[in-house]
Amino acid sequence: MKIRTVIGILAIALMIVLAGCKPKECTKDIECEKEHFVGGCSENKCVYQPIANECGNGLCEENVGENSCTCESDCGECKGGTGKYLGKSCQKDICVFGIKKDVKIVPTSLFEDRKMGDVNLQINYKFNSPFNTLADKIVMDVELFNLREGVSDVRITKVKALEKSSEFGSFESAVDFPSVGSKGRVDLKINKFSSPEEEHDIDLAVWYEYMKNDETVKAQFTYSKLPKIFFLSP
């Protein structure tokens, strides 16, 4: 028993000695060099102070232009989003909320040969998908392709983007087509939506007028073949 007791005491003593014999981290300042920091040796431990105005010092120093795009290591990654298409990304060294970098914008063009008795218009409807309400427009490139005898001076007076009873945008400037072969363009801006991402199935209602036998004729048609469009409002 005495031998066991002695052995136990020696073991405990050895553990205490070993616990107090931690290896020294340093003995002089030169052993504490670290990029972006001033290092020094204090009580056998390295102590570091960040060098001001350096990316990598662990401090996000906005006063010298550091942010998550110019110094990710200090300020964190520029990331986060609200849906399929919108999120944070770096643009010109600034973290902004907008369309994600990996989103592919697909330009779409649909052709229509619109025959309306007295008037024949050929129209290319152009838009991006997804559609950025802050930058994009629905474009109608229109050509007056043919007229009946006695008809002249065709004019588009108004275009509206509609979904049932809801109006999402309008164009209310006259576009004139004085003769066959005349071309014109409608740039239809879509209003910003309350939600960042919304999908809608819209129609384009077009109002037009023309002269026939010295009288003004007013009419309207609706283009209903647009696919569903994702509208983005960053």
Image: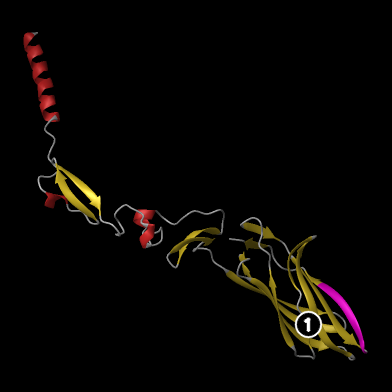
Q: Is residue 208 magenta?
A: no
- Residue 187 location, x and y as percent? 69, 76
Residue drawn at the location 31% of the way across and 52% of the way down? 58
User: In this image, 148 relative to 163: left or right?
Assistant: right
Q: Is residue 164 visible?
A: no
Q: Residue furthest front?
A: 63
- Residue 223 location, x and y as percent? 77, 71
User: Which quadrant holds residue 191?
Assistant: bottom right
* Residue of label 1: 121
In the image, residue 104 sits, relative to residue 183, either above or below, namely: above
Tell me the chief SS of the magenta region.
strand
* Disc 1 crowd, CA 10 A, few/some/many (<14, 14-19, 20+): some
Residue drawn at the location 10% of the way across and 27% of the way down? 17
- Residue 62 location, x and y as percent? 39, 58
In-front residue for pair 111/144: 144
Quarter that holds the C terminus: bottom right
Q: Is residue 216 magenta?
A: yes
Range of residues picked out in magenta: 214-221
Q: Amino acid at mark 1?
A: Leu
In the image, residue 157 sits, relative to residue 32, either above or below, namely: below
Residue drawn at the location 46% of the way across and 55% of the way down? 79
- Residue 99 location, x and y as percent? 54, 62
Q: Which secondary structure, mark 1?
A: strand
In the image, residue 54 sits, relative to residue 8, either above or below, namely: below
In-front residue for pair 202/50: 50
